[in-house]
Every structure is written in structure tokens, then in C-alpha cells.
Image (cartoon, grey):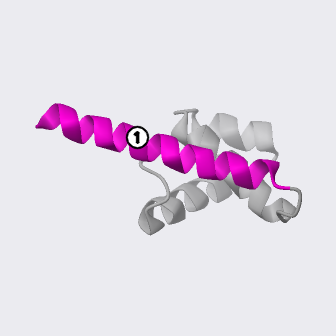
Amino acid sequence: MAYSLMKTARENQMEIRDRLEKLIKGRNTPQKIVLRAKTAVRVLEGMLKKHIADEMGISRTTVYLWARDSKKEGCLHC
């Protein structure tokens, strides 16, 4: 039972990542959405939020807010 739940969560995470990657690569995706999607992918990968902020050139507060908002909306499982 627990194994099947873990597998399902992992599959969901992969589906979310695939959707985020499509947004990032989309030619018509606004840059603010691309930035948020790139941030979300890094959070999913388990990268430290401080490192994400430094790499993306945004504040740590922004990274924390976006991660929290995405988790509330069910977009991220981090």
C-alpha cells in the first residue's frame, strides 16, 4: 500500500515537472511565467531556496512565496 502511494506521488511529481518544462520551452509563454516555472522545477529538484534565489537573480522571499503558493495550489509537492 505505502509503496503504491509513493509511486503515485513520484509519478505526479514527474507529470508536474513535464508540464513546467513545456511552459519553459513554450515560445509564447510570458517571461514572468517562465521564471516562475524555472523556480518551481528547481524547488522540485530539492535545490536550496537560497541557491535558487542567487541563481535566478530574485529575492529569497520571492522564492519562498512562489514555492508556498505553488504548494497551496497543488502544483508542487515539496
The answer to whether residue 28 is magenta is no
Residue interval drawn in magenta: 1-26
Q: How crowded is mark 1: few (under 14 residues within 10 Å), some or many (20 or more)?
A: few
Q: Taking 48 as reference, is 58 left or right?
A: right
Going 52% across and 65% down the picture, which residue do you hit? 69
Residue 25 image point, x, y percent: 80, 48
Magenta stretch: dominant SS?
helix
Residue 37 image point, x, y percent: 68, 53
- The N terminus: image quadrant: top left
Query: Where 22 sits versus 42, above or below?
Result: below
Amino acid type, residue under disc 1 in the picture: Glu
Residue 15 image point, x, y percent: 50, 47
Outermost residue to the right:
27
- The C terminus: image quadrant: top left
Residue 5 image point, x, y percent: 22, 41
Tell me where residue 43 sits by quadrant: top right
Looking at the image, which is closer to me, 26 or 35? 26
Residue marked by disc 1:
11
Going 68% across and 39% down the picture, which residue do you hit? 52
The answer to whether residue 22 is magenta is yes
Is residue 74 visible to us here? yes
Going 76% across and 50% down the picture, which residue do you hit? 24
Q: Taking 4 as reference, is 34 left or right?
A: right
